[in-house]
Image (cartoon, rainbow, N blue to C red):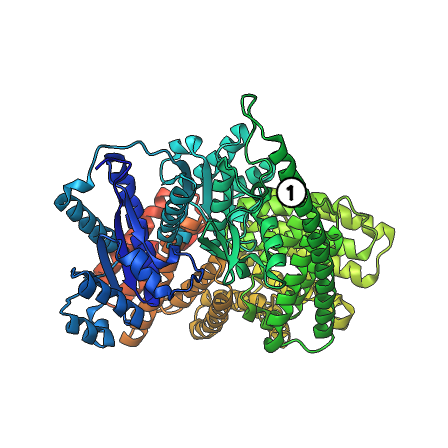
Amino acid sequence: MNSESRMPLSLFIASSYDTAHERAVMGDAVRRLNDKYEPLGCRIRLNCWEDFTPEFKGTRKQTEYNEQLIKKSDIFIALFKANCGRYTQEEIRIWTDDLHRTPIVFNIGDTSIINKSAVDAYLRGQGITPEAIVSDDDIYSKVTTIVEDYIATHPATMISPTTVVAKEIYATIPSDRKSERAPFGNLIRSVDDWAEQTFHSRCHLTTNDVAKISISDYYAAILKDAVSPSEEQEILSAIRYRTMSQKPDVVLYYNHDNQICSNHPAIANVISNSGLFNEAFDSLHRVRFNLVRWLHQQTVLSVELSAGVDIQDGWFVFFSFPVIPLGLLGIHDGTVTQQLVELLKLFSLSVLGVNTHVIKATDHIDLAALDEMMSRANEMSNALHDVEIEIKHRREAWLQQVSDNIDTLLSGEINDANIGYLTALIDRKEQLQELLSSDPRERLRTLMLMVQVSDTYPGPFTTTDRDADAQYLKVVKTADRFGIKDPTVEMMRMNYANYLHRMNHHAEALSFYETAMVNLETFDDRSELVRRYVMHLYVTYINHMAFLGENQRAIYAIQQLVQKEIRWEHQGLSKVETLANHCQILSCQLRIRPLLGNVEKLLNRSKDTYQKVMALPQEVFDSSVRIDIFCDFPNCIASTTIDAQPYLNTDETELKYIVDFFLGQVVDYAEKHIEEPGSLHYLSNALHNWAFFYSNLKGEQLRAREIAERALSVRRQIYTHYQYPESLYEIAQTLLILGATYVNDVDTLCETDFRTALRIAEECLNIYNSLNKEHFPEQETRVYQAIQLKGSILYYGGRKEEGLILLRQAWEWNLAHPKNSYEATFRGVAGEILEKEG
């Protein structure tokens, strides 16, 4: 037997519909084995119904499978989970009764499943004992053993090595798409088999070798949200090679709502600069469609205008190879002829015989055939033009209908039942506007409408599984893409920066904040709206700087803001707007740590300003600043009073009155306006600060504990809705205070309090340790504070030696880091106990 006459070694898989994944893994295993053995002279092929033509030829389809696939196979494998369909039983009978051969049978997963099903009875009747498969790796291992055993016992299968010329395909499939890896490999095997039989062309898959990208013909990346550094390098290398040499062809598959570009700016930048656009990833059918189209473009063929292209049973069929259901291509209506025209339009002009290859000077050109081909291509082009016009008209009609439905919904009551439909309509409107290349400002208004819905109906909106923060980013990207300048866009840029801040992506957040500040400077700030935006942005930026401990940058920004306020007042502001501005600027000044200058004078000015605020009805202040005035401002006054206590001429009774009054104001407002965005956040902060204040007063530990438990409850509630690192960090902060209330002012702990306090300390320590990689400001200090707390609880709970070990650990860290911000805390807790113990 020689390489021209030999038949490939072929496998057939019999199974029911519930083993689709395992079938794909087996297909990928066959591909890998073929890559290994074909250069040695053994072609390995899989026979499966997925690759078989769906057309009806007058014979029962199963009979065709039996004759063309099963009886022409060398190895028969049956897979079972919990089903054994009649066609699968028929296939096994063909193999056992007609061919008198023994099948290889596998049971997927736990054997207890198969023993409880009808499958077991059937197999026992056939005298077949299945072998268990427990994982994908197990499938690869067992298929390899089966094939290699067959080759070893059938030496005629192996002949002299052949040179396999194939189009090289390189693929990157990250871990968050790893479920697509085996199906993708199986897809390449399937397309390779078809191309070999149809075009005498081949395709070969390569992965995990970045050096081979430059010599590949085609590059595919199936992406979602994240890639590893090496995977990012593969993508960037492929795009760079394409830019330099037009090889490999690059297609990135991901949906528009995936976060790959926003999470990886380097990828987004190189895609933008190279003019690449993503291919929507809805299924591997889309990938197969592109590969078939690409392979056809690579092959020089003398074919009829639409040779090989057909529609059968709702499928696009190319040279009898089922490629993709028409529904997945968006082709639903019309006659077969109309569907075929639309299909050809999608399949590309290469199918028309136009530009399929470069004609060389030495080529003989059949001018008559070329004239006829060009004439037919022109006819098809005219038909396609008519189709395009009709599609445009239909899309315009759909856009109007969608817009009308949106208006109808917005005129009524929005609730959990219809919010999903509303947001889906807005998504559809945006898609139609994109397809119709509508006015960019109209498209921006649609995106802003989604933001408006999320802000106006935050409760129902959370049921749609849409990310409100992602909506802000879409608005910003669209505005930047079309060069649209709008102050509202800058507020949404700020909102996205707030999200980045909450996620602890501080460098990226800073970039968004500062871009918004620069852009807002270009607008006329004589309007109250722009002034309010500028104030809000500066306040948010200053708070961000204060959180990071960047006091000098925060102070500089405050100075800029004060200068703006002076200029605005010269322009003429209302009493209410002036008062609102004063409150927000004073909040910024109070938030700077360490406290600078005459703090008592600053506090007195703040208290006087708040008295003026209280003399006015809350409703006179714009709704956008009320929460800043009635929550943030009094909270800053109270927390600064607590921190500045050593510098104030205030006795304990007066101090309690000030703190109780201002924090009580915050709690009262937040609880009465709990539906307002941010209310829960301010409520939790006020309760936390209140608990901290009383935990530092002798004889007030029970009161501090009660308030801390309320604060912890609110913070846990926030974390259930917004699982940001910042929210988890805040839970740990309150746990630290709550745990401390058990050991402040005590010499011993009862068993009940000891168990409760130890549980609190261990949860606190676990959270801080888990967040250490997030690089929060003072994070390492907080870890050792939690270690100190746990040591104190163990010490006072009767486990002194264990406690002293932890206290020494915290104390030694403190000595090694003399500039840490909580040095006094270590000296006052660990230091006192260690000194007492000698």
Left or right of 596 on screen, residue 799:
left
Q: Where is mark 1, residue-wise?
A: 377
Q: Is residue 98 visible?
A: yes
Which quarter of the image is occupied by the N terminus?
top left
Residue at point 58%, 28% (across, down): 365
> What is the x, y in percent for residue 158?
19, 39
421 vs 383: above or below: below
- Which amino acid type is marked by label 1? Ala
- Choose between 574 and 593: the one closer to the eye: 574
Left or right of 724 on screen, residue 339:
right
> What is the x, y in percent for residue 415?
62, 77
Q: Secondary structure at mark 1?
A: helix
Left or right of 612 on screen, residue 3:
left
Q: Quadrant of residue 666?
A: bottom right
Looking at this view, name the residue that lies furthest to the top.
362
| Mark 1 neighbour class, 10 Å CA radius: few under 14, some 14 to 19, many 20 or more | some
> What is the x, y in percent for residue 553?
61, 42
Q: Quadrant of residue 376?
A: top right
- Choose between 787 and 178: the one closer to the eye: 178
> What is the x, y in percent for residue 192?
38, 44
Q: Is residue 823 visible?
A: no
